[in-house]
Amino acid sequence: MEWLGAMLTRYPELAVYLALGLGYWIGGFRIGSFSLGGVTGSLIAGIAIGWAFEVPVSGSAKSVVFLLFLFGIGYEVGPQFFRATRDAGWRFVALGAFVPIVGLLVAWLVSKELGLDAGLSAGLLSGSLTESPAMGTATEAINGLTQLDAETRARLVAHVGVADALCYVVGAFGAILICGVIGPMVLGVDLRAEARALEAQYGIRRNALGVVPAWQPFEVRAYRLAPDARIVGRTVREAERLSTDARLFVQRIRRGDALLPAAPDTVLVAGDLVAISGRRQVLVEVLGARADEVDDRELLDIPVASHEVFVSKPRWAGRSLEELSRSDELHGVFLRRISRRGQEMPIGLNTSVERGDVLQLVGSVGAIERARADLGELVAPTEATDFVALGLAIFVGAMIGAVLSFSWGRFQLGLGTSVGTLLAGVLVGHLRSVRPVFGRIPDGAIKLMQAFGLAGFVAMVGLGSGPHFLAAVRESGLALVLGAAVVVTVPLLSGLWFGRKVLKMSPLMLLGGLTGAMTFAPALALIQEKSESPIAVVGYSGAVPIAHVFLTMWGSVIVQLMT
């Protein structure tokens, strides 16, 4: 142990990677559907290692990885943060701001009542509201308290990690309990029945086992039209509209020895060989169960592609899939998946498409190209990161945050480099949604920035908090646990009332929005499991970008309020 302690003291970077490895191992253990996750696990592992060996930690190293994380978060939420609110969208924005604001006020009042110092107060807020990034902004704010000596600042920074580790478990269980159990009881709603009603509203159909998969395999088959086929005597346009439940497209026609393009006004006649794409059951419906399928390789020689398209054009932002399906530019294209900030969205006729969404489309090469031109840009596989945009955005954002401050009477709040970097990431992410060729960073790189940046930061916070852990727990442990229960409960119950009575939100969307306002995806997963539907993700995705920005900034604000 002495040898290991000497090695970690000499090479503290090894302690960080040890904390990361142990932390993700600890965070992977599950109790039902709940797990601590890699970030909280890394904090706990860092505290344990720091308590055992007192490893020195570089403040500059913490800042580097944390700024990387904040930029990644801002970059991801940027496309939706500035989007125009349509229909019920403003309600999710309001809820995403209301819950964090109430959370800040409650955390401040509880901290004052319990007599907590600024570090414990910040950890109480970040842990109870399950927003670990607030630890970073709080740490920066504490280090900026030049009226305090270095030893006091170091102790307060250590208290941030201690309090977060104690309060996070309370906050996580509280969010799961209120959103998944108490909330439905208070609202008096049957989650499964509510999910079915919302799915009908969104145009999503179920089968006996749950939600029907949004996409069926893209098939192109060739058939000889019998005289009694439903589409004989109809134009291509009329034939394609015979099925109201699913899309069907005539790709090519062979009439005698000639291959004809499937023009919308072309009339189909008995004996034609037609290449048709669509779901098999739809083909049977319009052609007849005894349709004669033929193997005509020349007729079926249609290049098929499957691509992801990044929605950047304003034309379709906020409009439904039903409206998209009627567009001539999207003719011949099938939708396989919609991804919004990494969350897969349910697909129905009334599901809206927002700027920044990624649509996975399948169809002929020509149809995909037409759709791409109308929607945005192809998400071409790339491993290149635009380090010019990345580096300059972090530099400029951090510089602006460092010099910009706001005064309100005797209270003065500086943005700080961390909040400045977060806002720079939001701006770059928004610009990327307008000009997709600008500031391109692969999704994998963004996920690594977020995961490694935050986990590495909290691991280093844990290493610094270790020597102070037991003393802080003896002094304020019980008070922190009880305070955390209040801080997580009041904002969520207030949000429940605000969303239902003031915003008039539907119960299931409200519950999903509450999980977004807490930026806590495990609670969303429980709601989806109990409702047997993914539909609540619509509420989550609407509230989470606003909540991420507010909750992250609150670390700085509560430190200022407590000092």
Image (cartoon, grey):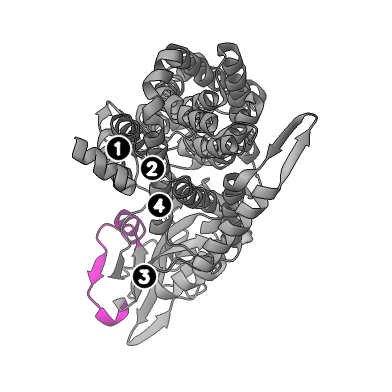
Indicate the quadrant containing the C terminus: top left, top right, bottom left or bottom right. top right
- Considering every residue shown, the one lying at the far bottom of the view is 257
Residue 46 percent location from the top left of the image = 34, 35
Residue 126 percent location from the top left of the image = 50, 30
Q: Secondary structure at mark 3?
A: strand
Who comes first in sequence, dot 3 or dot 2? 3
Q: Is residue 291 above or below residue 29?
A: below
Q: Which residue is mark 4?
A: 447
Q: Secondary structure at mark 4?
A: helix
- The amino acid on which the numbered mark 3 sits, given as a three-letter code, is Ala
Residue 236 percent location from the top left of the image = 46, 69
**Residue extent of the magenta highlight:** 278-299
Image marks 3 and 2: residues in contact by CB distance under 8 Å: no
Residue 289 lies within the magenta run: yes
Q: Is residue 311 above or below residue 32?
A: below
Q: Quadrant of residue 525?
A: top left
Q: Which residue is mark 2?
A: 455
Q: Quadrant of residue 553?
A: top right
Comparing 486 with 545, the one in front is: 486
Comparing 394 with 76, the one in front is: 394
